[in-house]
Amino acid sequence: MALQQHIFRPGVSLDHLLANRRWIRREVPFPHLVATNVFTQPFYNLLAQEFYREFEREAPEGLQDPALRMNGYDAYGLHFPPGIEGPLSIFLSRPWHDLLGSLFRVNATGFINAGLHHHAIGSNSGLVHNDLSIGWFVDYEALGGIRVPRHDLCRYTDGTPLVPDVSRIEMVRSVTMMFYLANPVWEPGHGGETGLYRCSNDDVHSPAATVPPINNSILMFECTPVSYHSFLRNNQSTRNSVIMWLHQPKSEAVAKWGDDKIVRFPRAPS
Amino acid sequence: MGRRQDRTISESTELKTDGKRVCLLTGAGGRLGSAFCSMFASKYDIIAVYRSQPPAIATQEQTLVDPLRPSTNLPENASPVFAIKADFADDRQHTRVVELALAHSGRIDLLANVAAWSVWAPLMESDQLLDSMRDQFQINCIAPTKLACAVARLFWQDRMHDNIASNRNIVNLSSIAGINVYPDGGQSVYGATKAALNHLTYHMASEFWSIGVRVNAIAPNSFPGIVPLAGVARSIVQLDEASVTGKIRVIDRHEDYYL
């Protein structure tokens, strides 16, 4: 098959890019979906190459540029900007957005936050959390109605306006997706898995289930009060991933889960 | 050795049990275990034991879904296996697994000891290899033997006639590395565990004869690199359907024979 057929373009259906049409829906410790060999090998290769290119474009020191260090999380991160092009744009496409929404039967709104994460070898385990968090957006005209946070206009985490008179929209994360790519071949003992938990106070190193960061595999789940998960320390290999969240109107999340269940990010110092 | 000697490897024995045979499978989350589950979930009532990752098929706790047609009812979900999470590094797990299997299915016809652990490295250079010796022997030799004994004590030992009538048996996953020495392959410890498993298989066959249970092993070359994965999975079924006992079936690139 010609490489051209594996290149993602807006409006292209996902049929010819998905290599595996048998994803796994698990119920324990909370409902989630996993799949391996998600994309065709040629398209996966393009995604993996683009992972490094994106970091090189954004940061002179590459994957571990201090400017990309994440606050309160032992990782380096990049946000996908509006209008991102190339293979990674598949994650900001309407078909991909609708696929995730339909798998969890959520009212997907087109508001997406997505980016790249890099955990250097020896990164510390994270905290057990559920991702049922507030996210702030600004509305704008966008292809397919897919809008990403405008970090130049308002802070995603707390809604702090960064320009005068900006109209902000308060949303709540509805679906979390992690796609693992551009990693060394993973073996048991390498670490870097995503741990899944039953309770918020479970020991981070005693997860009820783990999802290994195998290249071209995916983990996704609806954000609920019990979707407890965490990054697990990676002792022997880097852990690279695409991270992405769909969002729902806050009123819907409150009606579904209760206002007290919605997590607020601490307000960043101004 | 053999209570009943096979004439050919592919010879089948007509089963007297009604419905599907019950297979207790270890290593179900691994490459061979997953393939076995995918290929034979409609043939066997599989109790699939895994350490960390469940097999990629329908179980009591997971279903398959087509991401582009998530509402479609997939045929693969019609024969879910019964999955049990257990780490055989913990000696208490053998009895627990057998008790759960018997509670679920009422009997065990085939025990397929497929779980394996391997670390390949030069003996004189690798601390990791030396540190792994105990674990490799635990998973590759001790666990299959203890699990077989747990099945025998909890179910098979007072059922000799039923065992013979139901052609009950054990298939251990050995390796050609337990028979041949491949220089500079780093398989010293792994090969030793498999050689020990081969000898245990012979002894188990001798002792389990008294309760009417056959014991054999398969010793494939590297799969799926040298021998096809599906062929290795199928060889477990062929041994289950055969009548031999005390045999090591070697499966190599161009050869397939019993030791």
Image: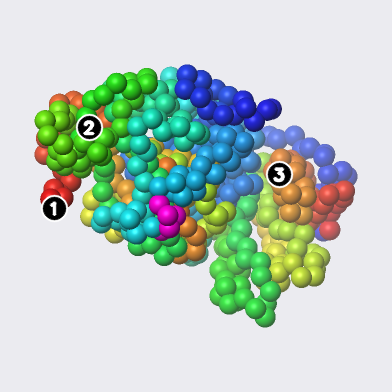
Given residues B238 and B22, the one toward you in this image is B238
Q: Residue flagged by tag 3: what amino acid is it?
A: Leu
Give yes or no for residue A94 being in the magenta stretch.
no
Residue at 60% in and 67% down = B136
Same chain shared by disc 2 and disc 3 = no
Quick one: SS at disc 1? loop
The x and y percentages for residue A240 are 45, 50
**Residue B99 in view (yes/no):** no
Q: Which residue is mark 2?
A: A137
Position of the C terminus of chain B by quadrant: bottom right
Residue B221 tag number: none
At label 1, counting other C-alpha atoms closer than 10 Å, the crowd grade (few under 14, some 14-19, many 20 or more) is few
Q: Which residues are magenta?
A: A59-64
Q: Residue flagged by tag 1: what amino acid is it?
A: Pro
The answer for how far apart the CA atoms under marks 2 and 3 are is 50 Å
The x and y percentages for residue A201 are 23, 55
Q: Which residue is mark 3?
A: B229
Residue at 42% in and 55% down = A60
At label 2, counting other C-alpha atoms closer than 10 Å, the crowd grade (few under 14, some 14-19, many 20 or more) is many
Quick one: SS at disc 3? helix
Chain containing mark 1: A
